[in-house]
Image (cartoon, helix red, strand yellow):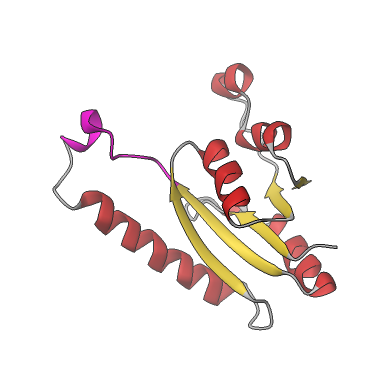
Amino acid sequence: MYDKIMLPVDLDKASSWEKALPTAITLCRTFGASLHVVTVRPDVRMPMVSAYLPKNFSRDAEAEVVEAQRAFIEEHIPDDITTQNVVVDGSPWEALIKVSDQLDIDLIIMASHTRHKLVDYVLGPNAEHVVHHSPVSVMIVR
């Protein structure tokens, strides 16, 4: 039923993955699916932002995130699960939709967040945007 499952993670917030990861592992094993662990970095390449950052900041930061995510995968995902490490830049929900299309993902599994900030009421949380805009199934784990 599922061949490619995507798990978005924020490496600084365990709440972004700790409830969703066991579900993703179970479904990968059940369907023999691969797991695509995705981290979205803020896009700092805009001239207005990048002018204030060190010369190779974006490249160095990406390398750090890739390495941190590799360590995350090694620590938290069993060896029997085929895993891909994916790091993308941009707005979280838009980047997740785009990369799910590029990777031909069948299912996106996300943890639910309720932060109760004003921005969540005005813009809506990323998970809500992914649910409303994704052309593939999205599972929200509470």
Position of 76 with respect to 2 (left or right) is left
Res. 12 in view: yes
The answer to whether residue 128 is above or below residue 74 is above
Res. 141 in view: no
**Which span is picked out in magenta?**
41-51
Residue located at (75% from left, 66% from top): 3
Residue 80 versus residue 102: which sits nearer the camera? 102
The location of residue 61, given as percent across then percent down, is 30, 55
Residue 74 versus residue 63: which sits nearer the camera? 63
The magenta stretch spans residue 27: no
Position of 142 with respect to 45 (left or right) is right
The answer to whether residue 46 is above or below residue 3 is above
Residue located at (60% from left, 24% from top): 120
Q: Quadrant of residue 105?
A: bottom right
Residue 81 versus residue 113: which sits nearer the camera? 81
The magenta stretch spans residue 49: yes
Q: Quadrant of residue 122?
A: top right
Residue located at (47% from left, 70% from top): 70
The location of residue 79, given as percent across then percent down, is 63, 83
Q: Quadrant of residue 63?
A: bottom left
The location of residue 24, given as percent across then percent down, is 73, 62
Number of disc labels: 0
Residue located at (72% from left, 31% from top): 132
The answer to whether residue 63 is above or below residue 32 is above
Residue 84 versus residue 140: which sits nearer the camera? 84
- Which image quadrant: the N terminus? bottom right
The location of residue 2, given as percent across then percent down, is 80, 62
